[in-house]
Amino acid sequence: MAQLSIVSGSVGLITLQNPPVNALSAAVRQGIVDTVEKALSDPKVKSVVIRGQNGVFCGGADIKEFGTKMTGPHLIPMIHAIEAGNKPMVAAIEGSALGGGLELALGCHYRVAHSKARLGLPEVTLGLLPAAAGSQRLPRLIGVPAALNLITTGRHVTAAEALQLGIVDQVTDHDTVDTAVKFALNVAGQSLDARRISTFPCPRPAELDALFEDAMQKVRKSARGAIAPVACVQAVRAAATLPYAEGLERERELMATLFNSGQARALQYCFFAQRAVGRWSTPSGARWDTSKPVPVPKAAVIGLGTMGRGIAVALAQTGLSVVAVETQEKQMMEAKQAVSGMLERGAKRRGVAPVSDKISYSGNIRAVADVDLVIEAVFEDMAVKEKLFQQLSAICKPGALLCTNTSALDVDHLASQTRNPELVVGMHFFAPAHVMKLLEVVYGRRSSTQAVATAMQLGKKMGKVSVAVGNCRGFVGNRMLKPYIEQAFYLLEEGATPELVDRALEEFGFSMGVFRMSDLSGLDVGWRVRKGDGLVEPGLASGPSARVRQGRRYSPLGDLLCEQGRFGQKTGRGWYQYEKPGGRVARSDPWLHSFLEGYRARHGLVARRIDHEEVLERCLYALINEGFHILEDGIAAGPEDIDVIYVFGYGWPRHRGGPMFYAGMVGLAKVLERLEHYHQAHPDVPHLQPCSLLRRLVASGSPPIHKWREVIRKLHSHL
Ligand SMILES: CC(C)(COP(=O)(O)OP(=O)(O)OC[C@H]1O[C@@H](n2cnc3c(N)ncnc32)[C@H](O)[C@@H]1OP(=O)(O)O)[C@@H](O)C(=O)NCCC(=O)NCCSC(=O)C[C@@H](O)CCCCCCCCCCCCC(=O)O
């Protein structure tokens, strides 16, 4: 797992061998210990270069080992032996040097990086801190403020930035190992006294207390309850205030609290789940590894509202030629301006030239005739989309994929409007589409394997986390949102306020509670959908029937607000009030509170005290219950798909792993018991009735989440 050879007569070349990222497994650690010892004791070796196999230096500690009984040498003494050695050690960094990988490089006396390499200490994103002395060495090398920034955000830096910060000594565009070997030959025999980072005094910035207080406030605000960023600040503080050995001890203590925490488990689960969704499969047997996507050099976007603009920008930034079609002149003018602004800002952020020439605009749908793939993003109205798909089917060249960005409508029905239904899939982006990472790729009953594979690959190229899901109303994300929002409305009827519900959800870790989110996205969106579903009945002011629709409990609260023209931020009034239409700062609205009181009085509802626990249980367990239905129906292939959708698209706090992972953490038996309890109290709310898959999982002893698929498979084979 690590090999030593001698090159250029006197340079010991140690190669880490653990594809694909040379993670520091027990075998690699043992290999490093052995080869370093050999190199140090071999009189022929005057200096040493450490590199990783296959163009990747090292992706850090082996995350798969965490949570298992860890064996093999520890990282800290291993890295210490490298630093303390009396022969110059040079890290040759290609690809990535992340986490333990960078910590290993910091133990070396010199670092040479390829210009395309990326370096960082991303442990915080896994619920950990750089506990192989990274939190103690990095501040000594680059100073406290820069180290704090890197360690608390986990961001990766380019080789150029690493050079500027002083993390690496040389950057090369040529062969990294050759360059590092030359470097090692040059420094052989030189004193290493000034090269051992652990012996550096940590630069103490002025206003140390204020600096750390500020850093702590920042992470507490952005971490929304995550504990690792806080521990990272504490560890860097130890570097700045304690001698190295004591700092190291503090790092160890802090790591011990993080290492077995639920948050670390949740974040590491997310890391693997994000990668697992790329290995998609469909109930018809289509799979990621047996499907061949078709190339998509040219694409079209139809409809240049908010979504269409974002999609066009995202496609152009990926390097595709884009035809942007909008038939309304005013909308087209506004869109052109908005798109060029988005492209310019994006280019500035990424330090590249804007790609405005990648987009051509047309008011005529015939302009899409020669594209390889079309994404429609027109108004969310089935009749409009039906007509468009009929047109596209006639206009587009043979084999062109027809994709819909609908957030809830029936993909099979749209496919049935075309001559080639196998070429139709959903590509459900999230607003703003050029920023949000999530893409739901919706396969219909007749979508071809190739169509799904092409949409999945295009999503990946666009930098999206793409999840393949089946076709049903709302797909995965929006389908689960419905019972969640519904519970929030019922809680208002029963005595809660929007502030109370939102506070409970935000303290849980959501970036926004349900009502602030509703104000942001616009209350009229849901109103239109409910009208389409025949649920809105204006004029039914009171009486029990006013709160029952289609035989179930229904809350008309959202409809009543819309009737008052309260659409949220855009009108300056919604569940909250705003300083002006388009304002963003939500303030409590006394009108809303007295409206709720009047509503309850009219309907004979007596307000009761509702606590955060009930808010969380009712909203989250209703959402999770729908997640189980989705798994039972085969709409999502596994719980990871649902969790990735919620973390990347719906603001679910990553350190809680996603709704299905969270259910496992709470305990499936508890979720079942609470759903039964609430369903008994609200028998007219079908979403609270526990799903039979949940019952089955509990009956099978609540297996860990990675075993749920077995239970689901058995369930499907019985159907
Ligand atoms: C490296 C990447 C940037 C590469 O990206 P790319 O897109 O090319 O590839 P993928 O991301 O798809 O990855 C390919 C493949 O590899 C798997 N993988 C990647 N990295 C790792 C890894 N580090 N370990 C294991 N496996 C990895 C990935 O899962 C893919 O496989 P799959 O089958 O899933 O498709 C990118 O991969 C990346 O960003 N990787 C992660 C980088 C990272 O976060 N590194 C940090 C790791 S944590 C760490 O290093 C910790 C160290 O600081 C300190 C460790 C000290 C440990 C001490 C433990 C003692 C605990 C004391 C407490 C005891 C308490 C008590 O119980 O008493």
Image: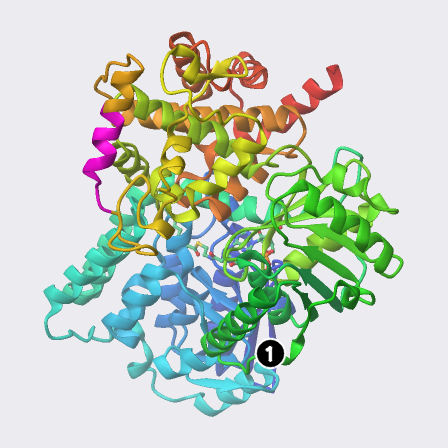
Q: Quadrant of the N terminus?
A: bottom right
Q: Position of residue 706 (x, y in %)?
A: 57, 32
Q: Main secondary structure of the magenta part?
A: helix
Residue 342 magenta: no
At a point 40% along the width and 17% down the height, the residue shown is 670
User: Is residue 168 in view?
Assistant: no
Q: Residue 339, percent across and down?
A: 54, 70
Q: Is residue 335 above or below residue 610?
A: below
Residue with the mark numbered 1 = 355
Q: Position of residue 75 (x, y in %)?
A: 41, 57
Q: Position of residue 74 (x, y in %)?
A: 41, 53
Q: Is residue 591 above or below residue 57?
A: above
Res 324 quadrant in image: bottom right
The one of 87 and 258 positioned closer to us in this rendering? 258
Query: Relative to the observer, which residue lies in front, 459 or 490?
Result: 490
Q: Is mark 1 within 8 Å of ligand 1?
A: no
The segment highlighted magenta reads: 587-597
Dot 1 amino acid type: Val
Left or right for 265, reference 475: left
Image quarter in which the C terminus is found: top right
Q: Residue furthest bottom?
A: 186
Label 1 crowd (10 A; few <14 / some 14-19 / many >=20)? some
Looking at the image, can residue 696 be seen? yes
- What's the residue at 54%, 38% (across, down)? 477
Of the pair 89 and 297, the residue shown nearer to us: 297
